[in-house]
Image (spheres, coloured by chain):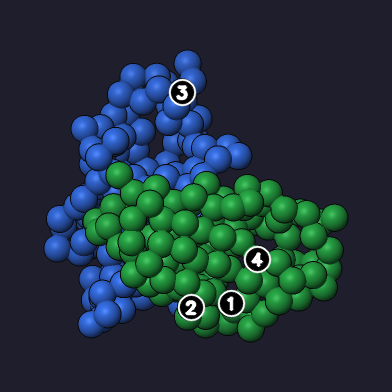
Chain colours: A green, B blue
Amino acid sequence: DMQMTQSPSSLSASVGDRVTITCRASQTISINLNWYQQKPGKAPNLLIYAATRLHSGVPSRFSGSGSGTDFTLTISSLQPEDFATYFCQESYTFPSITFGQGTRLDIK
Amino acid sequence: QVQLQESGPGLVKPSQTLSLTCTVSGGSFTTGDYDWTWIRQPAGKALEYIGRLYTSGNSKYNPSLESRATISIDTSKNQFSLKLSSVTAADTAVYFCARNKWVRPEGYYYMDVWGKGTTVTVSS
């Protein structure tokens, strides 16, 4: 079974900080990796698809990198509205879908 | 702008069947390169894939839920539905419907439109 492991599971940072979240797949998934942001009580919102492609309307401070099994989401300069939980999701093992366990980003 | 809205009972008794509907508005349900998905999230936990539906009516499921889950389509109402039988407290969660958008010919997809989610509690 595919496993998606995010690190760290939680993170404290300040406005203006550069933050990186990692997602590791248990088997190679090429670039079939998406990132979502979720705020409390809300549905997830797509940030990045195909590992590096910024979804329409998402601020350019968000970026993604990686291929194969190791991926990163970077926020170049944290804004107050970025404090949320972030999930990675693989889209390789069709028809199944596997999510990472989430990374909670809090204000320091 | 396509929107999704989940609806259904918020409380289900153990051993009964959970039934939810997702209504698709603001766009075509059957055209375009999409499929339609149910996802759930227990409080404070990760997202879990339940199953997906193609507009042909075919569906695929998470193997861990396949014996209990059924996803069906009603194109006349622009709706798709989830039934989950023999529920237990472990099925208590927020249930989301979402649209998977495919990018061809590369062959990847992503969930670009989500419903707001509906909370289902399994309790007697």
Q: Label 3 to label 1, Cα distance in Å?
A: 38 Å
Q: Are marks 2 and 1 in contact (CB under 8 Å)?
A: yes
Question: Which residue does the image show at 58% across and 82% down from the upper left?
Answer: A57
Circle 3 — which element? helix
Q: Chain of mark 4?
A: A
Q: Nearer the viewer, mark 2 or mark 3?
A: 2
> Does label 4 or label 1 sit earlier along the sequence?
4
Q: Label 2 to label 1, Cα distance in Å?
A: 7 Å
Q: Is residue B65 left or right of residue B110?
A: left
Q: Label 4 to label 1, Cα distance in Å?
A: 10 Å
Amino acid of disc 1:
Ser
Residue underneath mark 1:
A63
Amino acid of disc 2:
Thr
Amino acid of disc 4:
Thr
> Does label 2 or label 1 sit earlier along the sequence?
2
Quick one: quadrant of the N terminus of chain A? top left
Q: Label 3 to label 4, Cα distance in Å?
A: 36 Å
Q: Chain of mark 3?
A: B
**Disc sitting over residue A20 in the figure:** 4
Count residues near mark 2 (Cα–Cα under 10 Å), then give few for <14, some for 14-19, many for 20+.
many
Q: Are marks 4 and 1 on the same chain?
A: yes
Counting the numbered discs, the total is: 4
Q: Is residue A20 left or right of residue B92?
A: right
Q: Are marks 3 and 4 in contact (CB under 8 Å)?
A: no
Decide which of B56, B25 is in the foreground and name it: B56
Q: Position of residue A15 (x, y in %)?
A: 83, 68
Residue underneath mark 3:
B89
Circle 1 — which element? strand
